Amino acid sequence: MQQRQKLLVLYLRSPDLASQVGSWSVYDGAGQSRHTTGDSENPPYNSVLEAMQDGWRVIQFPQQWPAFPGMEYQTSYLKNEYILEKLEDFDG
Amino acid sequence: MVDRDLLLTTKQMASFVANGYLRFDELVPQDLNEAAIEEISNRKIPREEAGTSSEEIWPDPSAVGRVFRLPEIQGIIQSLVGPNPLYDHHAVHTVNATHDVGQIWHADAIIDLRMHFDIQFFYFSHDTPREMGGTMILPGSQFRRISESDISRYQNFMGQIAMDCKAGTVVVVHHGIWHCAQPNKTDRTRYMFKLRLNPTVRQLRLWNTDDIDDPTIPGILSTNHKWYGNEDRLEMVNRIKFWRFLTGDDDFDLHYWLGRLENQPETAPVLSE
């Protein structure tokens, strides 16, 4: 049986892996589930730590950079982006 | 001039600053909705040249023109962008029946450094229950410096709001608001009519300021959104600066967030003994 990557992207309140999820996305390379904008009102897990306890593997930690001069008070993209994966069986 | 009673209140303006939008349910009368949907669905609304005076577009008997000439809508327009704004563009947003994919999140703007702002009307001329969409918006996203669909990796946010509404509902948004069309799971086509307007005057106290000193206004301006996380205080700074711009009150502050940063004792004269 082949396997494909399923990605869970969680955006946290702070860099703390136990902090609350404010935004989330799911991309399923195995095609077993389809996800789109606005398809859920609550995240699948309350934190990255909770997802890890359910078997998800963290594959990206967000780097932390000091603000560029002049941009100390600007907001833009979501900062605390953690990418997690599971390998799903794929019957190709 | 619009009757002062039809202008937005300061409390409504504070909500616009905190959330990036205002919603007016069933504002447009049903007979006008029915006339408008006939024009919208049959693509009868001519595209005007960007920069045209909005007073010159879609003259009578255009139903869509009559919608935007309603005194209540004129009151919203004048409060936010002032008299005689410019037509930027319009669009008939259409989601076909049984379309089950949501549009990607985006803002209808590249990075926009102005404090002055454009507005966009989202006009729902027919009933739009949740299974039909409608447009989803992210409250409080309007000050984020992003370029159009660079936010398309995101799918869901705590506090996102889908416009589940009755015919005649109008939503007015700051040009920077993040939004996306939602799937239409019904067997009917969904329409949303969008109109963008540009100000031609300084956006300073254009609304009905009779309640400018209402004690609930700081609380409205301090509305938090769960998706902000630890950046909520930075968003408060954005709002303080915007409220100062709108009111002309350069000393306005919320919870001393900006005041303590503006305190620069290093510039004060040295006290001698």
Image (cartoon, rainbow, N blue to C red):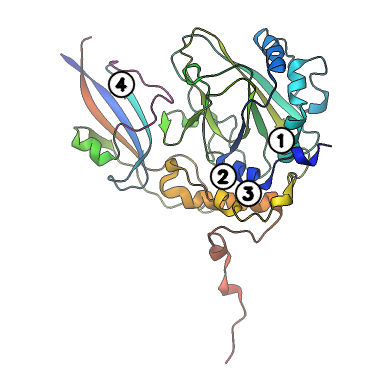
Is there one chain holding both mark 3 and mark 4? no
Q: Are marks 3 and 4 in contact (CB under 8 Å)?
A: no
The residue positioned 45% from the left and 48% from the top of the image is B231
- Residue B266: quadrant of the picture: bottom right
Q: Do the residues indicated by labels 3 and 1 lie within the same chain of the protein?
A: yes
Task: Inspect the magenta stretch and tell me whether residue A39 lies in it.
Answer: yes
Task: Pick whichever of labels 1 and 2 is earlier in the sequence.
Answer: 2
Q: Looking at the image, is B155 positioned above or below residue A30? A: below
| Discs 3 and 2 carry the same chain letter | yes
Disc 4 marks which residue?
A: A28
Q: Give the percent coordinates (x, y) of residue B73.
A: 73, 30
Where does label 1 land, which residue?
Answer: B76
User: To which residue does mark 3 refer?
Assistant: B242
Q: Position of B54 compared to B218: left or right?
A: right
Q: Which residue is mark 2?
A: B18
Marks 1 & 4, CB-CB < 8 Å contact? no
Q: Main secondary structure of the magenta part?
A: loop
Instruction: Name the kind of residue labelled 1 in the image.
Output: Ile
Q: Residue furthest left?
A: A1
Q: Amino acid at mark 3?
A: Phe
Compared to residue A52, the image places residue B53 above or below, namely above
- State the CA–CA distance, disc 4 to disc 2: 35 Å
Q: Quadrant of the C terminus of chain B?
A: bottom right
